[in-house]
Image (tube, rainbow, N blue to C red):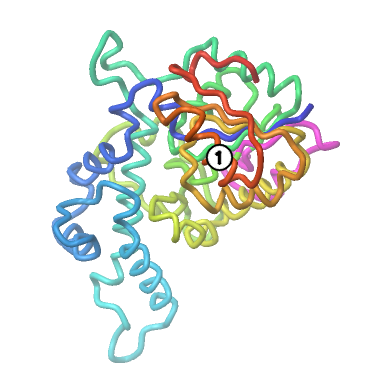
């Protein structure tokens, strides 16, 4: 029975909360030196009064509106008297994208900052990934992620199931993206969909989007070009705009619809439920399919989370609350 597995940031939070807490990581990215003081001042002008740095997606609403306006004006050719935008305006979208990239990069290369594993790369327990990979292989299921980290992709790569010639395909062949790479032979295998992007996804001038090697983003402070455009980091009301502006993300959301259609069961894991664009799509597509939600007990008890999920996803769901979600094996 083919399934669709959708994962949120709860995976990382279960391993190392400090390293995967979005508010904390955004603060660290702001202080990292990747942005100039001039870029910071422009971005601060877009934040709510009193904010000293962005610490949540909700604060970024106005900032994304201005990025969209700049991108419209960037399409207008300059005249003899100059461009519609000042140099600051010309640079503003790339500055915002650089910030998003740094946030995503920090999650992708996260290491434990304290405890017995201090200094070691954050990774999922083998028992967890092995059981999941076995079920994916057995059922030819799909995987979609909402987080920026490489926890699942690195584990699946090591298990030899994430590759366009393997069980899961993500549209990249020889590091180049093409929608045609998503098509399967005899509809065998599934798709791996980074729904909100990945720091490895970059543009190369007029050529196809590329995927960087994980090693290339390891070192902090390295200035990489054309990064961040395929990262969805903003208020939920503006996420659809970023998705529609990215060839990769647009393709992934198109194939998410197909994955929902051909899967007999939907399992949502470690996701807060706050992305209404995803919730609405699931509600529209679920039909009579079984929808299961696995989340941390700290999110709330059945009497709160059950009605919340039923309202968000358009019908009855099966809810599993775990003190430690990484002990889950009932795929």
Image position of 250 (left or right of 221): right
Residue 151 percent location from the top left of the image: 47, 26
Q: Which segment did they paint magenta?
A: 170-192
Residue at left offset 71%, top offset 48%: 285
Task: Please state which of residues 180 and 139 is positioned toward the viewer in this rendering.
Answer: 139
**256 w.r.t. 112: above or below:** below
Q: Is residue 164 visible?
A: no
Instruction: Examine the structure image and report whether residue 183 is included in the region drawn in magenta.
Output: yes
Task: Please state which of residues 56 and 151 is positioned toward the viewer in this rendering.
Answer: 56
Image position of 317 (left or right of 110): right
Task: Please state which of residues 180 and 190 is positioned toward the viewer in this rendering.
Answer: 190
Instruction: Examine the structure image and report whether residue 72 is included in the region drawn in magenta.
Output: no
Residue beneath disc 1: 309
Q: Residue at the bottom extreme?
A: 80
Residue 52 percent location from the top left of the image: 15, 52
Under circle 1, the secondary element is helix
**83 w.r.t. 233: above or below:** below
Task: Please state which of residues 178 and 121 is positioned toward the viewer in this rendering.
Answer: 121
């Amino acid at each position: 029975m083919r399934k669709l597995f959708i994962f949120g940031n709860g995976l990382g939070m279960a391993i190392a909360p400090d390293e995967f807490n979005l508010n904390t990581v955004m603060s660290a990215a702001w202080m990292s030196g990747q942005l100039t003081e001039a870029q910071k001042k422009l971005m601060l002008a877009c934040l709510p009064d009193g904010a000293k740095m962005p610490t949540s997606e909700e604060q970024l609403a106005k900032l994304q509106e201005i990025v969209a306006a700049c991108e419209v004006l960037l399409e207008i050719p300059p005249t003899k008297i100059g461009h519609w935008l000042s140099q600051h305006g010309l640079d503003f979208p790339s500055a915002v994208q650089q910030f998003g990239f740094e946030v995503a990069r920090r999650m992708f290369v996260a290491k434990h900052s304290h405890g017995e594993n201090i200094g070691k790369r954050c990774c999922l327990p083998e028992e967890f990934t092995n059981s999941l990979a076995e079920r994916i292989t057995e059922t030819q299921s799909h995987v979609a992620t909402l987080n920026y980290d490489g926890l699942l992709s690195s584990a699946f790569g090591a298990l030899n199931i994430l590759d366009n010639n393997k069980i899961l395909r993500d549209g990249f062949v020889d590091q180049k993206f093409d929608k045609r790479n998503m098509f399967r032979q005899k509809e065998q295998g599934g798709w791996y969909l980074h729904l909100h992007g990945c720091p490895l996804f970059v543009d190369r001038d007029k050529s196809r989007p590329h995927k960087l090697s994980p090693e290339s983003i390891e070192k902090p402070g390295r200035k990489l070009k054309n990064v961040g455009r395929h990262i969805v980091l903003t208020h939920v009301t503006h996420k659809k705009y970023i998705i529609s502006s990215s060839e990769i993300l647009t393709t992934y959301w198109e194939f998410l619809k197909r994955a929902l259609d051909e899967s007999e069961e939907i399992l949502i894991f470690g996701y807060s439920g706050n992305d209404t664009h995803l919730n609405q799509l699931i509600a529209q597509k679920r039909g009579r399919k079984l929808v299961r939600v696995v989340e941390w007990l700290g999110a709330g008890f059945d009497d709160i989370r059950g009605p919340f999920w039923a309202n968000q996803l358009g019908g009855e769901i099966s809810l599993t609350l775990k003190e430690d979600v990484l002990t889950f094996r009932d795929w």
